[in-house]
Image (cartoon, rainbow, N blue to C red):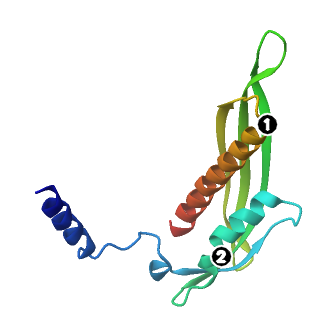
C-alpha cells in the first residue's frame, strides 16, 4: 500500500510541470562580466557559481558585477586556559551591479556561522571548508535574488 501511495505521489510531482524558479529560461538579463581581485578566492568561488548567468539567450538588460569578498575566522570564546572553544566564521561580500556603466545597485552581504573547536585539526579544517562552501552558496543565492528583482 505504501509503495502505491509513494508511486502516485511521485507520478503527480513528476508530471506537474515543476521548473526551478530562477532557471536561466526565465532570465531577462545577461551578466557580461564579473570583476573581482585575482587574490580573492571567495569571489572566485562566487563567480564560478554565477557563471551560468552569463549564457542567457533572451535578455533585455546587460549587467556587470563587481565583487569584493573576504573571510574572517574569529575566536568567540575561550576556556580557562585560554584555548579557543568556539570559532565564528564570517564571509562578507560587497556587490556592485552596473548597467550601462552606471551603478544600479550596491549591497553588502554578510553571512556567519559559529562552531566548536575540536582537538583533531584535520577534521576542523575539513569542517571549516564545508562551512565556507555553505556560506558562499548562501551569498550566491542572495546575489541571484538581488539580480532577479
Q: Nearer the viewer, residue 128 or 118?
A: 118
Q: Quadrant of residue 107?
A: bottom right
Q: Secondary structure at mark 2?
A: helix
- Image: 119 above or below 31: above
The outermost residue toward the left is 1
Q: Residue at x 71, y 69 (%)?
A: 47
Which residue bears the numbered disc 1?
Answer: 121
Q: Badge 2, how many Cα within 10 Å: few under 14, some, many 20+?
A: few
Name the spot of residue 35 as percent of width and height, x first: 79, 71
Q: Nearer the viewer, residue 64 or 99?
A: 64
Q: Residue at x 66, y 33 (%)?
A: 114
The outermost residue toward the top is 80
Q: Residue at x 60, y 78 (%)?
A: 52
Q: CA distance from mark 1 to mark 2?
A: 33 Å
The outermost residue toward the bottom is 57
Name the spot of residue 11 as percent of width and height, x first: 20, 71
- Say whether residue 56 is left or right of residue 45: left
Evaluate if marks 1 and 2 touch, with contact meaning CB atoms under 8 Å apart.
no
Name the spot of residue 145 as percent of width and height, x first: 53, 62
- Say whether residue 38 is left or right of residue 92: right
Which residue bears the numbered disc 2?
Answer: 51
Q: Quadrant of residue 100?
A: bottom right
Amino acid at each position: 500500500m505504501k509503495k502505491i501511495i509513494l508511486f502516485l505521489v511521485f507520478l503527480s510531482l513528476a508530471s506537474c510541470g515543476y521548473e526551478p524558479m530562477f532557471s536561466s529560461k526565465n532570465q531577462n538579463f545577461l551578466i557580461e562580466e564579473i570583476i573581482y581581485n585575482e587574490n580573492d578566492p571567495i569571489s572566485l568561488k562566487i563567480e564560478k557559481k554565477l557563471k551560468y548567468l552569463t549564457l542567457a539567450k533572451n535578455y533585455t538588460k546587460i549587467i556587470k558585477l563587481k565583487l569584493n569578498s573576504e573571510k574572517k575566522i574569529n575566536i568567540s570564546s575561550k576556556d580557562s586556559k585560554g584555548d579557543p572553544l568556539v570559532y565564528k566564521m564570517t564571509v562578507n561580500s560587497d556587490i556592485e551591479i552596473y548597467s550601462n556603466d552606471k551603478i544600479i545597485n550596491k549591497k553588502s552581504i554578510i553571512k556567519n556561522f559559529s562552531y566548536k573547536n575540536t582537538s583533531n585539526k584535520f577534521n576542523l579544517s575539513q569542517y571549516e571548508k564545508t562551512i565556507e562552501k555553505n556560506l558562499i552558496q548562501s551569498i550566491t543565492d542572495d546575489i541571484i535574488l538581488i539580480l532577479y528583482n
